[in-house]
Image (tube, grey):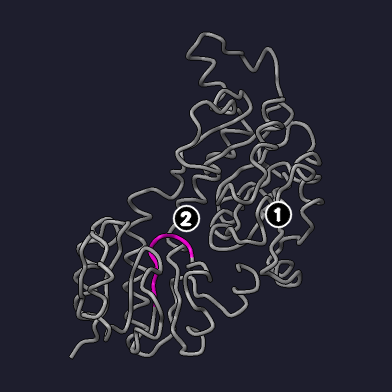
């Protein structure tokens, strides 16, 4: 008899996650239960208590004790569940794998991050807007601070799957990469050819800084008003993972003053205030949280889930998804 697995992926539609081939493979390796685009009602949980894995948008399934055979929880929303919603110590004690699909988004978001950075450093979006209104300027006549990425110093706030993908894309530019990440030791970062540094040093030295870290209770407004003030005039900051990590109004003030440039894909509230003045800032490149919202990236989730589920059900360690570690509790909270 095949192990039973609860597929409860809402808010994401099943067919946007699983290709036809991956869905067929999933049904080969396990007995899929539920598998609908609507959320499984809590009053029906009792029908599925024997499942060995749950695949869901987030943890909304009550106490772990109610799932005695559970071996893995695999989220398809994009980040590990908050410790306020899931009992991690209990999961670790039972050796339940807590897995996130976040690596699926790494390549697509990294590519978008590079595009946003280039749009800001070469002022592509601004030039496009001006050209459409007949206000363009011609670079052989005057310059206004554009710069290339070649040989520049780049800052990474966070070095996870997204940072790894972005680093690969930046290699042809011969950049020097500074990293601030409390999950990584200095010696490990140095072994990869990158330079660990404080946030203050990064703000002072980087030509372009990327916000790539996962939000937690410890890093709200990690990039503060005081740190933003350290950025030299004309430099660029790219807000790519979550706006939670930056004092957004302080950033908006710096950008509206035309002191620095920003490329932004995520916002404190979404949908974003239609009256916010940053929408009209000449020094901002704005994107509507679409770096990872891409068909290929979503199907990548299904690939990772299927491969790691097969491994877990066969008593092997998962290799594709991000696995929560006990140290996660101290840093995420």
Q: Is residue 31 visible?
A: yes
Residue neighbourhood size for the residue with mark 1, other residues' Cα within 10 Å, grouped as few (<14), some (14–19), many (≥20)? many
Find residue 280 and report its image quarter: top right
Task: Pick whichever, 307 or 82, lies toward us.
Answer: 82
Find residue 126 and report its image quarter: top right
The residue identified by callout 2 is: 107
> Residue 310: x and y, percent?
32, 81
Find residue 101 and report its image quarter: bottom left
Describe residue 333's horizontal placement relative to residue 181 as left or right: left
> Residue 16: x and y, percent?
27, 55
- Looking at the rendering, the stretch of residues picked out in magenta corresponds to 73-79
- Specify which label sits upstream in the sequence, 1 or 2: 2
Residue at the (57%, 13%) spot, across then down: 136
The quarter of the rendered structure image containing the C terminus is bottom right
Element assignment for label 2:
helix
> Residue 35: x and y, percent?
21, 68
Q: Is residue 29 visible?
A: no
The quarter of the rendered structure image containing the N terminus is bottom left
Task: Pick whichever, 57 or 158, lies toward us.
Answer: 57
Residue at the (76%, 53%) spot, across then down: 199
Seen as rendered, the residue at the extreme top is: 134
Indicate whether residue 183 is drawn in magenta. Answer: no
Residue at the (44%, 60%) spot, across then down: 78
Task: Pick whichever, 263 or 32, lies toward us.
Answer: 32
Describe residue 332's horizontal placement relative to residue 57 as left or right: right
The residue identified by callout 1 is: 177
Element assignment for label 1:
strand
Please tell me how many numbered marks the rendered image carries. Answer: 2
Say above or below: 215 vs 240.
below
């Amino acid at each position: 008899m095949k192990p039973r697995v609860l597929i409860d992926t809402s808010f994401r539609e099943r067919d946007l996650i699983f290709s036809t081939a991956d869905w067929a493979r999933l049904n080969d390796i396990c007995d899929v239960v539920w598998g609908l685009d609507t959320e499984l009602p809590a009053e029906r949980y009792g029908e599925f208590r024997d499942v060995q894995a749950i695949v869901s948008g987030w943890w909304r399934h009550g106490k772990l004790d109610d799932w005695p055979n559970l071996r893995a929880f695999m989220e398809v929303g994009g980040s590990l569940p908050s410790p306020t919603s899931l009992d991690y110590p209990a999961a670790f004690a039972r050796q339940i794998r807590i897995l996130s699909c976040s690596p699926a988004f790494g390549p697509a978001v990294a590519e978008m991050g590079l595009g946003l950075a280039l749009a800001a450093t070469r002022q592509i979006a601004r030039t496009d807007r001006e050209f459409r209104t007949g206000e363009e300027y011609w670079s052989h006549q005057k310059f206004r601070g554009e710069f290339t990425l070649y040989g520049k110093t780049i800052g990474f706030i966070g070095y996870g799957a997204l940072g790894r993908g972005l680093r690969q894309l930046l290699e042809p530019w011969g950049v020097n990469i500074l990293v601030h990440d409390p999950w990584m030791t200095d010696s490990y970062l140095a072994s990869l050819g990158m330079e660990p540094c404080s946030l203050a040093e990064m703000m002072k030295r980087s030509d372009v800084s990327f916000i790539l870290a996962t939000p937690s209770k410890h890093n709200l407004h990690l990039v503060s008003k005081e740190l933003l003030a350290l950025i030299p005039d004309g430099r660029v900051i790219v807000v790519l993972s979550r706006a939670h990590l930056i004092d957004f109004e302080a950033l908006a003030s710096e950008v509206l003053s035309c002191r620095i440039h920003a490329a932004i894909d995520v916002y404190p509230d979404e949908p974003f205030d239609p009256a916010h003045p940053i929408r009209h800032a000449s020094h901002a490149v704005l994107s509507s949280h679409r770096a990872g919202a891409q068909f290929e990236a979503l199907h990548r989730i299904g690939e990772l889930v299927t491969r790691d589920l097969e491994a877990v059900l066969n008593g092997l360690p998962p290799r594709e998804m991000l696995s929560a570690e006990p140290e996660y509790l101290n840093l995420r909270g």
